[in-house]
Image (tube, grey):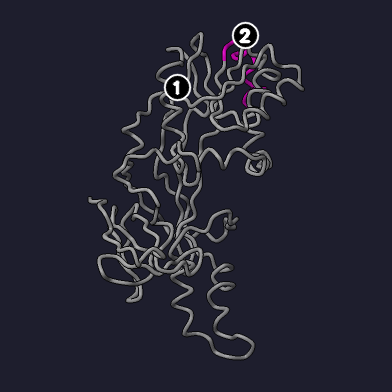
Amino acid sequence: MSCGNSGRSDDEDQRQTYYAISNYTAVEDSQLSLSEGDVVDVLEKVNETWWWAEVEGETGYVPTNHLSETCPSEGVDRWQDVEYFSSYNTLKLHLEMLSDKPRTLAYRTAFETARAFIQGKVVLDLGCGTGILSVFSACLGDSRKVYAVEASDICEQAERVISHNSLSEKVSVIQTKAEDLELPEKVDLIVSEWMGTMLLFELMIESVLVARDKWLKPDGVMWPSEACLYLAPCSAHSVYNEKVMFWNDVYGFDFSPLIPVTQAEILGHPLHNHVLPEDDCLSPPATVARLLLKTATLEDIEKITSSFKFKITKDGEFHGFRVMV
């Protein structure tokens, strides 16, 4: 894979250079295929999904979710860069996460039911955000000490929350990356809400494993202790009808020639934050990946291969996969 100079001349300053971060096979003549590491000169940012670009002298549409301003071979841990951490500096994202009641209540229940284990113990809350898990640990679990570690500036707000709830003696807020963390003692429990889109997106799990290897006692516990990724084939007929079949009748006129274009836009990239009814699934989910956090290694997550199959249990047009964690 090569990420050399794109060879642009001074009169091409209006172009923006990006790099392909993964392979992509064109499905239409108007699209370009990409190989990881390709230099992509973006000529026009047409919309959020597709840009008009040039690759090795050929022009066409390229999917934006396969592009990055950073060359993959530079080995940048993208989750650790400034852009990643700045996204956690404001309360907007934290409000969204805390508003996810099933997820947050699952952690609260864990601290309540495991109080006998946690009481008097030392806990590391990695990526503490505004501090909710640290508060759970100190109050509901009655832990002796909580180290609340956060790399972004939101830790300043976490300190305010901890102080306001009179927990400063139990909870120490530390602003640092997990890789640079120094503690005065080993911990009995590491708790973290590291799961991203499709489980591993953002790769925060790498830092969790680094902290585990350095700071978890031999008989210590990881929360979550296990993480799974599930897939199920689905027929997203409501979205498909709304976004694709719409073009069959536009105020009484036939716009169906636009259907292939919108199909590529809708089906060519993930649909985030969309609640897909379980009834839209064409089969029960299959387990694609299972990680045991006490023993998983960095090598285990760098490349995950899995063999699985689906038993289709209902009729329907296959549009893609529903992803669950």
Q: Amino acid at mark 2?
A: Gly
| Residue 21 seen by the camera | yes
Q: Which residue is mark 1?
A: 180
Specify the farthest residue to the bottom. Answer: 253
Residues at circles 2 and 1 in contact by the CB criterion of under 8 Å: no
Q: Residue 184 versus residue 257: which sits nearer the camera?
A: 184
Q: Residue 106 versus residue 272: which sits nearer the camera?
A: 272
Residue displayed at 38% across by 70% down: 61
Q: CA distance from mark 2 to mark 1?
A: 26 Å
Residue displayed at 66% across by 27% down: 158
Q: Which residue is mark 2?
A: 120
Q: Quadrant of residue 118?
A: top right
Q: Count neighbours of disc 2 (C-alpha within 10 A) and say few if under 14, some if 14 to 19, many if 20 or more.
A: some
| Residue 101 seen by the camera | no
In this view, the mark in front (2 or 1) = 1
- Helix, strand or loop for disc 2: loop
Q: Count neighbours of disc 1 (C-alpha within 10 A) and say few if under 14, some if 14 to 19, many if 20 or more.
A: few
Q: Which stretch is magenta?
A: 110-122
Q: Position of residue 222 (x, y in %)?
A: 49, 23
